[in-house]
Image: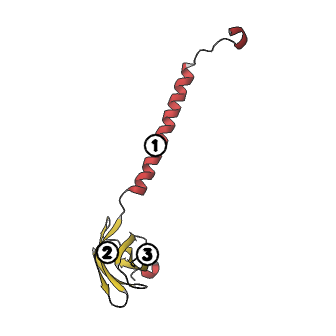
């Protein structure tokens, strides 16, 4: 059989070790990048808000009070709050400016139709120009 197919080659240990080290280095780099991206996307938000209370108001409106927590209390932020109707669809939305130092904010959201609840959609430090304080 050796005449037909040739002699069996001996495994080259240097080549195998080189391949193992290269694969290990690539795997470590890829794992590090994946961990960094995951941390950036899944870590706690720098500014966040939770609903404290909501109360229906006359004229298809709802008042919502939120508590804002942020990692930089001296920066202004913006939170988006929304009203929802009976089917759970958004029926009103409002952006509210959260001034530096404030932790609790209340506002009234005008709704299309009767609102049954209100909640916080999200918060950010990227305050639009039309909403910033002068």
Instruction: Judge whether 46 appears above or below 65 on screen.
Output: above
Query: What quarter of the picture does the C terminus occupy?
Result: bottom left
Spatial CA span between label 3 and label 1: 40 Å
Using the image, determine if residue 23 lies above or below residue 44: above
The furthest residue to the bottom: 59
Q: How is the image coloured?
A: secondary structure
Residue topped by disc 2: 100
Q: Residue at x 63, y 13 (%)?
A: 8
Q: Residue at x 41, y 75 (%)?
A: 87
Decide which of tag 1 and tag 2 comes sooner along the chain.
1
Residue at label 1?
31
| Label annotation for residue 89 | 3
Q: Nearer the viewer, residue 134 or 89?
A: 89
Which circle's residue, 3 or 1, is located before the other in the chain?
A: 1
Q: Residues within 10 Å of mark 1 (few under 14, many from 20)?
A: few
Q: Residue at x 32, y 87 (%)?
A: 57
What secondary structure is found at the residue carrying circle 3? Answer: loop
Q: Where residue 75 sits in the image (x, y, percent)? A: 35, 71
């Amino acid at each position: 059989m050796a005449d037909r197919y040739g002699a069996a080659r001996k495994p080259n240990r240097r080549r195998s070790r080189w391949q193992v080290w290269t694969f290990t280095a690539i795997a470590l780099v890829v794992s590090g990048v994946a961990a960094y991206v995951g941390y950036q996307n899944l870590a706690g938000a720098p500014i966040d808000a939770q609903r404290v209370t909501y109360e229906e108001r006359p004229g298809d409106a709802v008042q919502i009070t939120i508590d804002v927590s942020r990692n930089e209390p001296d920066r202004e932020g913006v939170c988006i709050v929304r009203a929802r109707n009976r089917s759970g669809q958004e029926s009103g939305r409002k952006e509210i400016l959260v001034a530096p130092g404030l932790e609790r904010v209340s506002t009234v959201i005008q709704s299309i139709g009767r609102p049954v609840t209100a909640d916080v959609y999200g918060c950010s430090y990227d305050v639009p120009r039309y909403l910033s304080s002068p």
